[in-house]
Image: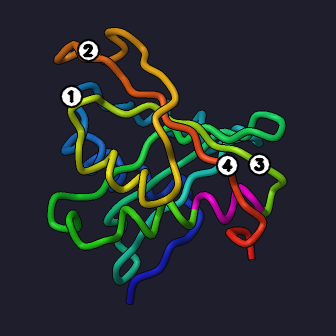
Amino acid sequence: MEEIREMCLSDIEAVLRIEKGSFSLPWSAAAFENELNNPDTFYYVWTEDNEPMGYAGFWKILTDGNITNIAFSQSARGQGRGQKLVAFLKEKAGQMGITAMTLEVRKSNAAAIAVYQKNGFQIAGMRKDYYRKPAEDALIMWAEIKKEETQ
C-alpha cells in the first residue's frame, strides 16, 4: 500500500539512500535531523509497504513556502509520483496559511521542471552557478497557492 506521511527520524537512513542516488552533493543525516527538529520545516515520505520510496520537504517562512528538496528512488521515478507529491506539498502548505511557494531546480532538469509546471509553478528568475558538481544555473520557480488547492 502506498501513502504519504510525515517523515520521522527513523526514516533518515532510507532517505539518505534516496538522497545519494539523486544528488551529486547529498545532504547528511545531521542535516535531515536538524530539518526534522525545526518547527518551521515540514518533511514527508512517500512509502510503499511502509518503506520510503521518495521524500520532499519545505520551509515555512511567514506566508511563503520554499520547497527544499524532492527525490524518489530510481525504481519509483517516472510514474507520476513526483507530480502528486508536489501537489500534496502545496495542499499542506495552503492549510498552514502559506499563499505562495518557491523552489530552485537545475536548469537542465527538464523532467522536474515539467512536474513543477504541471503544478502551477512558473519560472521567475535564475541563480547563476547555484549548483556544484557539476556547476550549473538554477531556475527559480514560483507558484501561488489557490484556495481550491487546500481542501
**Which amino acid is tagged 2?**
Arg
- Please tell me which of labels 4 and 2 falls first in the chain: 2
* Helix, strand or loop at mark 2: loop
**Which amino acid is tagged 4?**
Glu
Q: Nearer the viewer, mark 2 or mark 3?
A: 3
Q: Nearer the viewer, mark 1 or mark 3?
A: 3
* Helix, strand or loop at mark 1: loop
Check residue 12 for magenta coloring. Answer: no
Measured Cα–Cα span from mark 2 to mark 3: 31 Å
The residue carrying mark 1 is 24
Residue 74 lies in quadrant: bottom left
The residue carrying mark 2 is 132
Measured Cα–Cα span from mark 4 to mark 2: 29 Å
- Please tell me which of labels 1 and 2 falls first in the chain: 1
Check residue 90 for magenta coloring. Answer: yes
Q: Nearer the viewer, mark 1 or mark 2?
A: 2
Measured Cα–Cα span from mark 4 to mark 1: 30 Å
- Please tell me which of labels 1 and 3 falls first in the chain: 1
- Please tell me which of labels 3 and 4 falls first in the chain: 3
**Which amino acid is tagged 1?**
Ser
* Helix, strand or loop at mark 3: loop
* Camera-side residue of 80 and 146: 146
Q: Which mark is residue 144?
A: 4
Q: Is residue 93 left or right of residue 83?
A: right
Q: Which mark is residue 99?
A: 3
* Camera-side residue of 83 and 33: 83
Q: Are marks 3 and 4 in contact (CB under 8 Å)?
A: yes
Residue shown at 21%/28% (left/top)?
24
Q: Are marks 4 and 2 in contact (CB under 8 Å)?
A: no
